[in-house]
Image (cartoon, rainbow, N blue to C red):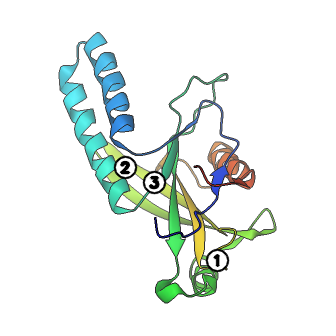
Amino acid sequence: MLGATKDPDFHLKLLDGWERHVPDASDRDAIDAEMKQRCMAANRPDLHAHLRMQMDQAFSLMKQQNVIAYFAATGQPTGDVYIPGSMFATIRRAPNGESLDGYVTHAIQTYDAKPLFGDKRFIRFERESTKELQGGSIVMTSIVYVTPIPGSNHRRGLQLTASVARPVDMSATDPVFVGWKTAFDVCVSTLRWAPPAA
């Protein structure tokens, strides 16, 4: 409305069975309706109430974090590979309208960030934490990718954060887990920019 140029849109070649979503009310309602149908078919209305509460928390958190899109395995896969994770897109802004160079330097020094597959348009780093769940624990790995938005003079960047879970007894060097992370890396490496949506 103020005449500012819109940021370009972005596209990814998604993983098998994965789809892009916008975290709005209609998306939330569609997911809730599908969950309800599955739970009722399994005669588990109690499970629907529990899942709905988790979904409400997830959408609330996405709103707080200004998530502009999320990616999840909500489609029909053609193969039998399942990755227990998701990915979120946010816009990272430098404070006081400055360049993102300070953030990149901090990520390199603190998190050992490196270019994605040697492509210096992207920085990539990982963080890990252990989460306690009913009946055990899981290790959550967050893979963060940041690339500058064209036309922003490096003041804004697209941040894609992939989260993937593994059992605590699965090593970080397990070929299956490494394969999951590589799948996200390849997906992000396909990022292409497009003119902003009207």
142 over 134 or under it: above or below:
below
Viewer-nearest of discs 2 and 1: 1
Depth order, front residue of 126/152: 152
**SS for tag 3?**
strand
What type is the residue that disc 1 sits on?
Asp
- For label 2, the crowd category at 10 Å Cα-Cα, with few meaning under 14, some 14 to 19 and many 20 or more, is some
197 over 93 or under it: above or below:
above
> Whole-percent x and y of residue 182?
70, 50
Q: Residue at x 19, y 21 (%)?
A: 45
Q: Residue at x 67, y 48 (%)?
A: 11
44 over 122 or under it: above or below:
above
Q: Which residue is mark 3?
A: 139
- Quarter-of-image position of residue 173: bottom right
Q: Which residue is mark 1?
A: 112
- Quarter-of-image position of residue 159: bottom right
Q: Is residue 134 visible?
A: no
Do labels 3 and 2 touch, CB within 8 Å?
yes
**SS for tag 1?**
loop
Q: Is residue 76 visible?
A: yes
Q: Residue at x 59, y 49 (%)?
A: 197
Distance between mark 1 and mark 3 Cα atoms: 20 Å
- For label 3, the crowd category at 10 Å Cα-Cα, with few meaning under 14, some 14 to 19 and many 20 or more, is some
> Whole-percent x and y of residue 93?
51, 76
Distance between mark 2 and mark 1 Cα atoms: 26 Å
- Quarter-of-image position of residue 102: bottom right
Is 79 left or right of 32, judged from the image as shown? right
Q: Which residue is mark 2?
A: 137
